[in-house]
Amino acid sequence: MMTQSTPHILLINPWIHDFAAYDFWAKPMGLLTLAGQLRALGIRLSYIDCLNRFHPRAAQSDPAARYGRGPYLKTRIARPIGLQDVPRRYSRYGIKPQWFEADLLNLKPPDLVLVTSLMTYWYPGVRETIEHIRSVFPQTPIVLGGIYARLCAEHARKHSGADHVAVDPAETILESLLQKFTGFSASATVDPNDLDTYPYPAFDLQTTINYIPLLTTRGCPFNCAYCASHFLEPRRLLRSPESVIEEISYWHHRHGTRDFVLYDDAFLVDAGRHAVPILEGICRSGLNLRFHTPNALHIRGIDATTARLMHQAGFTTLRLGLETAEFDQRQELDRKVSQGEFKRAADCLIKAGFNKNQVGAYLLVGLPDQKITAIEHSIQTVIDCGLTPVPAYYTPIPHTALWPKAVAASRYDIASDPIFTNNAVLPCRQDPFSWEMITRLKELAAG
């Protein structure tokens, strides 16, 4: 009886092309989750991270500095066509092209290459990455997945250079992709409706583990006008608290990890059933850990109990999804929080022992038709509550309720090319980009 050969699959996290980029706890969790599933099938894996800050040929840096955050290596490149008037430097962020080529040449030719993607306007970095892969492995099929691929599928088919663009969640089409491109037949090892059946993401494929992203839930019960989370994952799925505690313990004891980063969109929703048991389990473990929430916490879920437990568990960096303090006019954006709920949450966090340097409230800047006075009011409201305002520059996203309004308001033809949705150029303002407003807001936010 003939046995099928095990394929070799190469997974790649591509370069970023942008005016600015920084590792604010950014890891390709979807790609590494897929790697964990492939490993469970017995697939031979290779992994190259074009954003690897700890590449063997890079200057040495302390992985634990800034709780794992840090600058990417960058190389200045030409600004994209249509954005030459923006008075900012444009760069490739990540390892040098010659390092990437050498890493590719060191591998045995793969049977399939899987490339992920994130921000839609980063697609030039994806395209350049695929060009380099193609130059070394011209016969190997390349599949592109990730957020850009799913939000801008037709654009990705035309411009990425990939052989196939995956528009469905990877775990739902993994077996068919393997069969189509490698001839390998495999049975599913995970139940897409049960997060507890998923193997841990293959973070050990990285050259350095300086923090671990955690996903304790998928999906978000809200459908905010500016956010594509509900489009990308319309279901709400929760892991059991026990499985989350087990994973935290695994990475801490096996790799000495102290910093954990919550990637959940709505960790504190229905906190009594989910977040509270997890936080209590962390506290009972006695582990000396730090937790960070760059994806923002749901403000309505913060009360005296959750604030106390987060502080006791070692939560160190908190970000809150406030978005605006124009509470009487926020119905077009979301219905997540009222003025009273925000003030109550701020008071609970301060009483629990958090200080303003630990707790920041995200405020959207650059929304269609947004007045500068509204942003200034929101900044002052956050300061008055004893927290730190954190400007979050708005990116227009296809498949969101706010997209048509953004298309109408933008000085660019953002529907024609994702490059024009880059939040660094404030695409929904009619006036050309200027440092004056950004500097003004930074000064206000700094108090």
Image (cartoon, grey):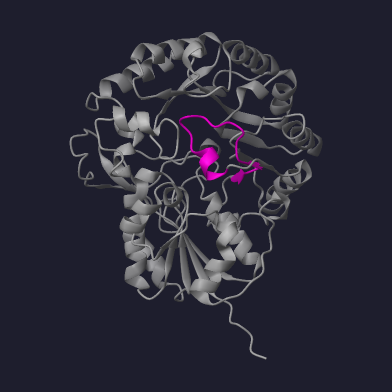
Residue 427 visible in image: no
Q: Is residue 217 above or below residue 389?
A: below
Closer to the camera in the image, 343 or 193: 193
Q: Point out residue 297 in the picture as x, y percentages from the top left corner.
A: 60, 28
Residue at 36% over, 32% down? 404
Name the outermost residue toward the right.
Answer: 284
User: Which quadrant of the rendered structure holds the N terminus?
Assistant: bottom right
Residue 191 location (% of width, % of height): 69, 56
Residue 135: image quadrant is bottom left
Does residue 135 lie above or below 21 as drawn?
below
At 34% across and 15% down in the image, what residue appears? 371
Q: Which residue range is magenta in the image?
A: 212-233
Q: How many marks?
A: 0
| Residue displayed at 54% across by 56% down | 206
Residue 268 place in picture, x, y as percent: 67, 30
- Any magenta on residue 243? no
